[in-house]
Image: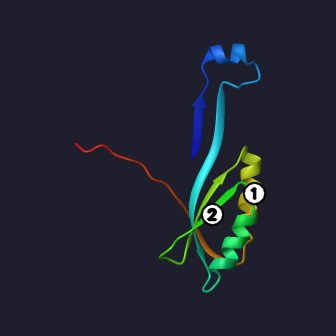
Amino acid sequence: MTIVIEIPAFMSVIYPCIKKTIKMPIKSYLAHPHQGKKMELYQTLSALSKCEVIPAENKDLLILVTDTDSSSEEDRLQEKLQAIDSMKLLAMVSGFNTTKN
């Protein structure tokens, strides 16, 4: 998921360093550890920059939110995530609200 923030044209005149569109790739995952490896996985993920980790209280899984500044930074983070031995599965998740008719 990429969040795009549109900057009004007058802001780029006042602040020329502001780009008109800012992309921030924020992604959320459910990280499933191998049996007995939840704490190890938590510590490994917590040590990575651009990552926030929240342990589930009632399940053997972790919630991972990543926020990278560029696609190259995202690619490097993905390589690090794929190399983690204590992780069995990493599932990207998304959510949205729908209106009731």
Residue 92 locus on image (x, y percent)? 55, 60
The quarter holding residue 10 reads top right
Residue 66 locus on image (x, y percent)? 65, 55
Badge 2: how crowded within 10 Å, few (<14), some, or many (20+)? many
The quarter holding residue 45 reads bottom right
Residue 55 higher or lower than 67, as above or below? below
Going 63% across and 63% down the picture, which residue do you hit? Answer: 53
Badge 1: how crowded within 10 Å, few (<14), some, or many (20+)? few
Amino acid carrying mark 1 in the image: Ser
Q: Mark on residue 49?
A: 1
Identify which residue, 37 or 25, lies in the foreground.
Answer: 37
Residue 21 higher or lower than 38, as above or below? above
Q: Is residue 39 left or right of residue 80?
A: left
Q: Mark on residue 53?
A: 2
Going 64% across and 46% down the picture, which residue do you hit? Answer: 25
Helix, strand or loop at mark 2? strand
Residue lying farthest left?
A: 101
Q: Is residue 13 left or right of residue 4?
A: right
Residue 8 higher or lower than 5, as above or below? above
Amino acid carrying mark 2 in the image: Val
Q: Are marks 2 and 1 in contact (CB under 8 Å)?
A: no
Query: Between marks 2 and 1, how big is the CA–CA gap?
Result: 11 Å
Identify which residue, 61 or 93, lies in the foreground.
Answer: 61
